Image (cartoon, coloured by chain):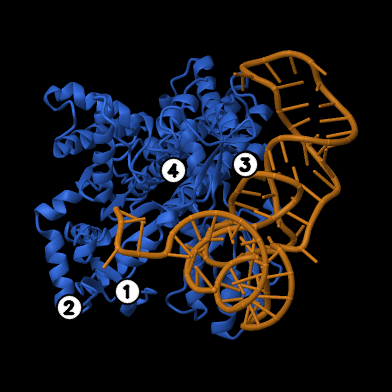
Amino acid sequence: MSATDLLRAELTRAARSLGAPEAIEPVLERPRDPSFGDWATNLALVLAKPLHSKPRDLAQGIVEAIDFRRAGIRSAEIAGPGFINFRVDTEVVARGITSLIQADESYGRSDAGEGRPVNVEFVSANPTGPLHVGHGRQAALGDAIATLLEWTGWRVSREFYYNDAGAQINNLAISVQTRVRQLAGEQAEIPPDGYHGEYIRDIAEGYVAAHPDDAHGGNLEAIRTFAVAELRKEQDIDLQTFGVKFDVYFLESSLYSTSRVDKTVKRLVEAGHTYEMDGALWLRTTDFGDDKDRVMRKSAQFGGDYTYFVPDVAYHVTKWERGFTRAINVQGADHHSTVTRVRVGLQALEMGIPQNYPDYVLHQMVSLMRGGEEVKFSKRTGTIVSIRELVEEVGRDAVRWFFLMRKGDSPLAFDIDLARSQSDENPVYYVQMAHARMSGIFRVGEIDPASIGADGVDFGVLALPEEQELMKALLDFPAALASAADALEPQRLTTYLLDTAGRVHLWYHKAHVLNEPEPILRARLVLARAAQIVIRNGLRALGITAPERM
RNA sequence: GCGCGCGUAGCUCAGCUGGAUAGAGCGUCGGCCUCCGGAGCCGAAGGUCACAGGUUCGAAUCCUGUCGCGCGCGCCA
């Protein structure tokens, strides 16, 4: 049980003894000013209304009802309008650091998810081109969210859905076919809504080499198959470069071949939420809060196909039926209009799927900055900069960190110069350096960090304010990680790591380790080990490496 | 026009689901160190949290409206 759990449990007991409602859950937070103490609670302020008493009187009652020993505190003071500030027993801090080191690689893990399954879908790029930096942000976010959920006890499946069936694939095939014809010396133009990137020519050349019998590109079906396979291969390399692995690749075409699309449509019709108009089949999405109804099946004059959201709904039915009672989709905010449609489609099926299923994590656009100017184009791919190029230039760790350090809600200006720089101003360098420095202590001292144990160590000698603050920060790690996981906001963890790395550096400058006399040496080795573990685990949970030296 | 998101220090951004005097880095100014395991460290200035109302013990955070920016608004995906 962590220090905060102890205190919280005791507060709950004290509050109930004063007549507080059963459901009360005391909130603990770090006081803004560390001189106030280690933890503060607003419990008395919250209870003032239901109990019809003055906050300060209640606070007094709570303080008197607390068993300090059981709560693991050495003082409790009432402040301001009714806050209660606590100072944690030094013994409790010592125990916390001790169990941190014992937990080692699993420090920060919790079982809030209780092993329940969750599906995290991200990237889901159609095989019509290389992955660009927007997909990169998605890959970093999705992979980090998935890992954070694993750390908090969920059974995670990473899933990549791709459209290998629709109009865009047709566009791709025609674009490649055009290039094949040009190679054969024919006059041909890629249609305006086709794909114009340089890579299309590469694929055309590959096709001709693999299909010498079809040098003029007459076999559109073979071209389509070839192009999709090539681009899937390229995207896999992109993902590999980025270090992302998926558990499931889900093909849109399989939804047709298994009749799942037809079944979904049938069910929607039977549920009575559809109607025919102008030769098309419509879903009455306005019944569920959409601003207009949506076409499900196009009329004959538009080709008679299903619109994209129909297979998308069928796809999400499979997630539900595969046992994923929780599903998270990571997408660019430019696709946010799909959120309502997918959810509404699932509601209209009336099969007991919750209204807010699936969860969405939407992220804003990425722009690349170099030399203070925006980078717009890439030689290789035309109008986009591919994630592979970016990773090759600045490195996987920096790319991941930069994509994770901002809230998804805000647009991201990726500073290439900063990401490359080997200096404290580069946040990922700064954090990794904190880990490398801790590792350096053990390397120089020729001590195996894994051999460090905290038994019998006198924590009382860690009296510097910097080491007190550092220990507190290290003990905050599990809560910081859990908060990032719960909110599906990895930037909470990057923020925590940056702050904690700052405390590590501060301590490192202030306190020597290796040349100190015995009781201090041992205690500081323990602290260095604890810091090393926290930074390493935090970076790993974000998919970033923690180097031993830099 | 409608929907979603955003607006916090000169710049880039945090702000832990409503808490105390709104924070960090960079930049600026002043000082210290210039021995170390990669030259850092200390301090200062800098804010109408876009604006106006509202909710309550208490709002950057929740609600309403206004302004500005981004994205979306197809029988495209």
Which chain letter goes with mark 1?
A
Chain identifier, blue in the render: A
Which residue lies under the disc numbered 3?
Answer: A468
A260 in relation to A530, above or below: below
Q: Are marks 1 and 2 on the same chain?
A: yes
Q: Earlier in the sequence, mark 1 or mark 3?
A: 1
Q: Nearer the viewer, mark 1 or mark 4?
A: 1
Determine the CA span between mark 3 and mark 4.
Answer: 41 Å
Which chain letter goes with mark 3?
A
Q: Nearer the viewer, mark 3 or mark 4?
A: 4
Q: Nearer the viewer, mark 2 or mark 3?
A: 2
Name which residue type carries label 2. Ala
Q: Percent x, y for residue A58?
A: 61, 77
Q: Earlier in the sequence, mark 1 or mark 4?
A: 4
- Name the residue: 30% across, 57% down: A327
Q: Are marks 1 and 4 in contact (CB under 8 Å)?
A: no
Name which residue type carries label 1. Asp
Name which residue type carries label 3. Gln
Determine the CA span between mark 1 and mark 2.
Answer: 16 Å
Q: Are marks 1 and 2 in contact (CB under 8 Å)?
A: no
Which residue lies under the disc numbered 4?
Answer: A134
Chain identifier, orange in the render: B
Determine the CA span between mark 2 and mark 3.
Answer: 63 Å
Which residue lies under the disc numbered 2?
Answer: A271
Q: Work out which residue is located at the far bottom of the displayed protein and give it.
A: A52
Q: Percent x, y for residue A75?
A: 63, 58
Kindly identify which numbered label has been placed on residue A373.
none
Q: Nearer the viewer, mark 1 or mark 2?
A: 1
Mark 1 lies on a secondary structure that is loop
Q: Earlier in the sequence, mark 2 or mark 3?
A: 2
